[in-house]
Image (cartoon, rainbow, N blue to C red):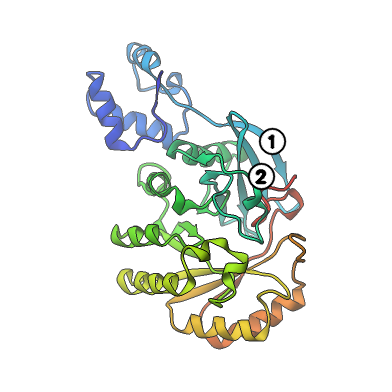
């Protein structure tokens, strides 16, 4: 079986080329060609000799994802479905901002999901495995090739729980961050988790530089488990203790992501509890509307969103209201299992 070079970091590529009896600088050429230039075959490398290309073709390859479906929203959002073979598919979303300065790619970390959050259609998919680093990285390479544009931000908020695939997610994030590839600042790479405490602790211990977001969705310790089953394994009190350890140790702000569900987590008492929590943690709050009727729930109206946001103002922390780009192609948050 041929060795797939996509997904390897610089050191791994150096060991590979040395095993072929080639000088180390060949690894740097491969590294730049694969990640910076997006090459998918050795024939595209103009700086490699024909003899070396033949040697590489005998033992190695640069794999690419297969595009199954490409949908374009009326708001400019684009959703790509990629096939991994064996009835396994993942989805990635291209999200341009209104001013076109910010271009975000939302990528998946698993095939399906290991969790079943009650508000998330993606969680209804059967879990079929963790993605390898090359499958994570190639989502960005493929989306940029399809759109013909370079991204400015990457968010690990697609299919799956990133911290249940910690090693491959962190490896991919460092490839995006590397100065010779995408050269994205660490603050332009956001990893979101539902609250996998052991991985959060590891993230802290390793002093990973990337933005950290926690899918909170309910600040009440006696209610969060009703919409997020992970809370039964990692209770909210323990999770918030870990979050405070994060902000104190790394001296960084975290983002609480909050799916707004009318008649579930948008009442005055819940808002007051969230305000109290936000005052005790170095954080910002990202409000996200439930994007479709699901599980007997409905999306909030604009009036309900504004009212809930006003209830949170006493917290004195930044509060954002993330809109829902790509709803018409099922590309918005929590909709990746739905038909486009």
The residue to which callout 2 is attached is: 79
Determine whether 64 is above or below 310 in the image. above
CB atoms of marks 1 and 2 within 8 Å: yes
Crowding at dot 2, Cα within 10 Å, few <14 / some 14-19 / many 20+, comes out as many
The residue to which callout 1 is attached is: 69
Determine whether 339 is above or below 263 in the image. above
Lateral position of residue 45 relative to residue 259, left or right: left
User: Residue at 33% across / 38% down in the picture?
Assistant: 9
Lateral position of residue 235 relative to residue 95, left or right: left
Crowding at dot 1, Cα within 10 Å, few <14 / some 14-19 / many 20+, comes out as few
Lateral position of residue 20 relative to residue 223, left or right: left
Snapshot quadrant of residue 65: top right
Q: Position of residue 168 (x, y in %)?
A: 41, 44
Q: Which mark is first along the chain, 2 or 1?
A: 1
Say what secondary structure mark 1 lies in: strand
User: Residue at 57% across / 36% down in the picture?
Assistant: 145
Query: Can the viewer see residue 258?
Result: no
Q: Position of residue 224 (x, y in %)?
A: 57, 71
Q: Which mark is residue 10?
A: none
Determine whether 227 is above or below 36 in the image. below
Viewer-proximal residue among 2 and 187: 2
Q: Check the image and name the residue furthest to the bottom.
A: 314
Marks 1 and 2, how far apart at CA: 8 Å
């Amino acid at each position: 079986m041929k060795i797939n070079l996509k997904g390897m970091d610089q050191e791994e590529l150096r060991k590979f080329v040395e095993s072929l009896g080639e000088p180390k600088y060949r690894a740097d050429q491969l590294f730049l060609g694969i990640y910076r230039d997006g090459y998918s075959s050795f024939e595209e490398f103009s700086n490699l000799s024909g003899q070396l290309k033949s040697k590489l073709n005998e033992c190695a390859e640069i794999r690419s994802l297969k595009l199954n479906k490409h949908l374009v929203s009326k708001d400019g959002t684009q959703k790509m479905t990629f096939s991994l073979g064996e009835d396994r598919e993942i989805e990635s979303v291209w999200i341009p901002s209104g001013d076109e300065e910010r271009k975000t790619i939302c990528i998946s970390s698993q095939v399906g999901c290991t969790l079943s959050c009650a508000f998330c259609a993606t969680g209804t998919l059967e879990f079929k495995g963790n993605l390898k680093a090359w499958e994570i990285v190639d989502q960005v390479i493929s989306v940029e090739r399809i759109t013909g544009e370079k991204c400015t931000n990457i968010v690990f908020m697609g299919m799956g729980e990133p911290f249940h695939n910690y090693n491959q997610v962190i490896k991919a994030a460092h490839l995006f961050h590397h100065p010779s590839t995408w050269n994205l600042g660490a603050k332009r790479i956001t990893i979101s988790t539902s609250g996998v405490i052991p991985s959060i602790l590891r993230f802290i211990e390793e002093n990973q530089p990337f933005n950290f977001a926690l899918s909170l969705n309910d600040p009440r310790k006696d209610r969060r488990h009703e919409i997020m089953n992970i809370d039964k394994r990692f209770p909210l009190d323990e999770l918030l203790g870990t979050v405070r350890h994060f902000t104190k140790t790394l001296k960084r702000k975290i983002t609480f992501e909050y799916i707004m569900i009318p008649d579930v987590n948008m009442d005055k008492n819940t808002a007051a509890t969230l305000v109290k929590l936000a005052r005790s943690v170095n954080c910002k709050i990202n409000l996200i509307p439930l994007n479709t009727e699901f599980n007997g729930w409905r999306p909030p109206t604009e009036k309900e969103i504004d009212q809930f946001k006003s209830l949170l103002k006493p917290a004195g922390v930044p509060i954002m209201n993330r809109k829902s780009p790509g709803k018409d192609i099922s590309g918005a948050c929590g909709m990746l299992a739905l038909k486009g």
